[in-house]
Image (tube, rainbow, N blue to C red):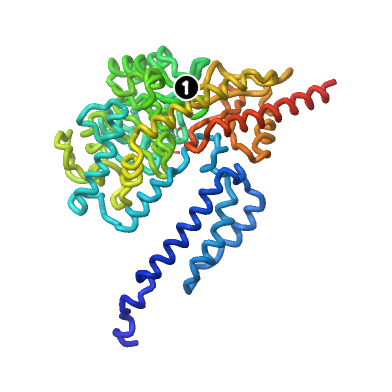
């Protein structure tokens, strides 16, 4: 074949649509998304029926030739439907967020212009925009100037980089002697995993029992640290959880900070779930001290309702973040941080311009709109708690932990765990709301976590109705069985 034959004119190059094609494919996608989002409230909270068959239908080899977009989208629609509806108003499981549409527009622009923000040099103003978003998040947590941060794909990556940063700041190369402390209610799938990825031996992760309110006990922490020191180990990091994902408990940050100061350990606040409630004054008082922690994990894809893939790590003395993640000659500690590159602050090098998906909605709506949403979610949790407490067949914890309300079916005999797993199944089978459970102190609890921005009072009332219905029905059945 002649070399010439492999040259294409731009007109025939299908990866670059011409004007009319651009309009056509773009509006097809817009219509597709529009149809989906405008009907969210009437979609089931969960539909996984026969999802397996659909999975199989996608196990095809790569298509040799292109197909019309309309046909492709027609296959995608049913695939999206087969899922837990994490973007709908009935999603009260795990920790919701939502996916503010304006963030998708931010991504659309960012991915379309496809600029490289990993180093400042190639898109200095866009890198500055992302840095300014991180500065906003740092200010929301009360961090001083000199803090640095990085937008991550989520909380787990932020926690991982937090361990790496603490390790670099406090431990150096003595990995096998370093010990890390977190409570049994901490997010261990990310903290313990992050420690392991960071080279800390598994047996050096101390998981401390919590008090009845699911908070770390400072006295136990003090003892654990002292014992490890006496054994010649090097306690380098303590994790406080600001809003546990099971019950929304907030660790006593001030007391932990005091211990950490005398022991010279790094204190990381895992505020992936709870952090943004600091925007609401009444909740902010519950997390006093977060501004003094060495690092903070935030999850804008939870508390700022952003789409999945939006996490953040903030480091109070930003030089340590750079010190830990920078490739090149070792630098002890750097103070000139104004012009630093994102590539020096995380394991990633090339990535998308992640800042725009936060910057655009914050510009369009202002932080006030988010603060109002968060205040509403706290109030909705109060409402849910008050209503559930009035249902005779249920017991609730003392009060909501931030926007989480935990409850369980009362049982006459046994630990009730099996019954509560069954109650959860029955509630979710109604497909109006989606809840999840959690094992806390050996007891299986059901929980409502209100943090989907689309969840409003009518949806919480629906949830209460479904729960009341199913709990009372189940209680009657159990009574009938036992007599
Ligand atoms: C959700 C959560 C994480 C993990 O975040 P991902 O975004 O899922 O990676 C870590 N810690 C806490 C407290 C969380 O709630």
Residue 481 position, x and y percent, is 82, 25
Where disc 1 sits, the SS reads loop
**Where does residue 441 sit, x and y in percent of width and height?**
56, 21
Residue at (69%, 35%) from the top-left corner? 426
Q: Quarter of the picture for ligand 1?
A: top left
Looking at the image, residue 17 sits to the left or right of residue 431; the answer is: left
Which quarter shows the C terminus? top right
Relative to the observer, which residue lies in front, 257 or 176? 257
What residue is shown at x 33% (from left), y 54% (from top)?
A: 109
Residue 52, image quadrant: bottom right
CA neighbours of label 1 inside 10 A, class few (<14), some (14 to 19), many (20+): many
Residue 184 seen in the figure:
no
**Is the CB atom of the residue marked by disc 1 within 8 angstroms of ligand 1's nearest atom?**
no
Query: In screen coordinates, is 296 left or right of 305?
Result: left
Q: Position of residue 79 (x, y in %)?
A: 57, 55
Residue lying farthest to the top in this orientation: 219
**Up-down: is 235 above or below 52?**
above
**Residue 16 position (above or below residue 58):** below
Q: Nearer the viewer, residue 472 or 215?
A: 472
Q: Nearer the viewer, residue 26 or 433?
A: 26
Q: Residue furthest right?
A: 483
**Residue in the picture at 36% in, 14% down:** 255
Counting from the top left corner in percent of width and height, residue 463 is at 61, 32
Q: In the visual, does 7 lie left or right of 382?
A: left
Residue lying farthest to the bottom in this orientation: 2
Q: Is residue 253 above or below residue 173?
A: above
Q: Which residue is mark 1?
A: 249
Give me the residue at 31% from left, 75% from top.
10
Query: Is residue 166 visible from the viewing direction of this image?
Result: yes
């Amino acid at each position: 074949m002649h070399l010439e034959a492999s040259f294409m004119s731009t007109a025939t190059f299908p990866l670059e649509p011409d004007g009319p094609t651009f309009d056509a494919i773009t509006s097809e996608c817009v219509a597709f998304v529009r149809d989906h989002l405008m009907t969210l409230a009437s979609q089931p909270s969960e539909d996984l029926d026969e999802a397996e068959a659909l999975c199989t239908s996608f196990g095809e080899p790569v298509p040799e030739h292109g197909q019309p977009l309309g046909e492709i989208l027609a296959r995608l629609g049913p695939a999206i439907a087969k899922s837990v509806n994490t973007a709908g108003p009935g999603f009260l499981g795990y920790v919701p967020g939502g996916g503010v549409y304006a963030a998708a527009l931010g991504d659309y622009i960012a991915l379309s212009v496809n600029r490289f923000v990993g180093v400042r040099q190639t898109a200095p103003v866009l890198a500055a925009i992302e840095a300014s978003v991180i500065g906003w998040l740092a200010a929301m947590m009360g961090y001083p100037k000199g803090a640095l941060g990085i937008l991550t794909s989520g909380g787990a990556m932020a926690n991982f980089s937090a361990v790496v940063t603490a390790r670099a700041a406090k431990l150096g190369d003595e990995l096998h002697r370093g010990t890390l402390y977190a409570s049994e209610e901490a997010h261990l799938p990310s903290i313990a995993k992050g420690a392991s990825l960071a080279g800390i031996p598994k047996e050096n992760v101390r998981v401390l029992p919590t008090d009845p309110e699911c908070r770390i006990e400072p006295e136990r922490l003090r003892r654990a640290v002292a014992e490890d020191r006496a054994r010649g180990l090097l306690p380098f990091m303590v994790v406080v959880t600001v809003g546990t994902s099971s019950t929304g408990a907030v660790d006593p940050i001030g007391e932990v900070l005091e211990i950490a100061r005398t022991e010279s350990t790094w204190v990381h606040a895992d505020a992936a779930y709870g952090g943004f409630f600091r925007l609401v004054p009444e909740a902010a008082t519950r997390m006093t001290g977060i501004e003094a922690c060495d690092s903070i994990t935030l999850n804008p894809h939870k508390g700022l309702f952003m789409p999945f893939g939006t996490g953040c790590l903030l480091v109070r003395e930003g030089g340590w973040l750079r010190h830990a993640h920078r490739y090149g000659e070792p630098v002890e500690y750097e103070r000139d941080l104004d012009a630093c590159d994102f590539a020096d602050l995380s394991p990633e090098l090339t990535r998308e311009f992640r800042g725009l998906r936060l910057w655009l909605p914050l510009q369009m709506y202002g932080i006030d709109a988010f603060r109002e949403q968060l205040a509403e979610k706290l109030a909705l949790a109060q409402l849910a708690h008050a209503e559930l407490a009035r249902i005779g067949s249920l017991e609730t914890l003392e009060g909501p932990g931030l926007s989480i309300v935990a409850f369980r079916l009362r049982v006459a005999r046994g630990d009730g765990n099996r019954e509560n797993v069954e109650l959860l199944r029955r509630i979710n089978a109604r497909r109006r709301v989606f809840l999840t459970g959690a094992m806390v102190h050996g007891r299986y609890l059901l929980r409502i976590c209100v943090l989907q921005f689309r969840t409003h009072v009518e949806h919480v009332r629906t949830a209460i109705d479904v729960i009341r219905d199913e709990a009372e029905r189940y209680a009657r059945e159990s009574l009938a069985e036992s007599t």
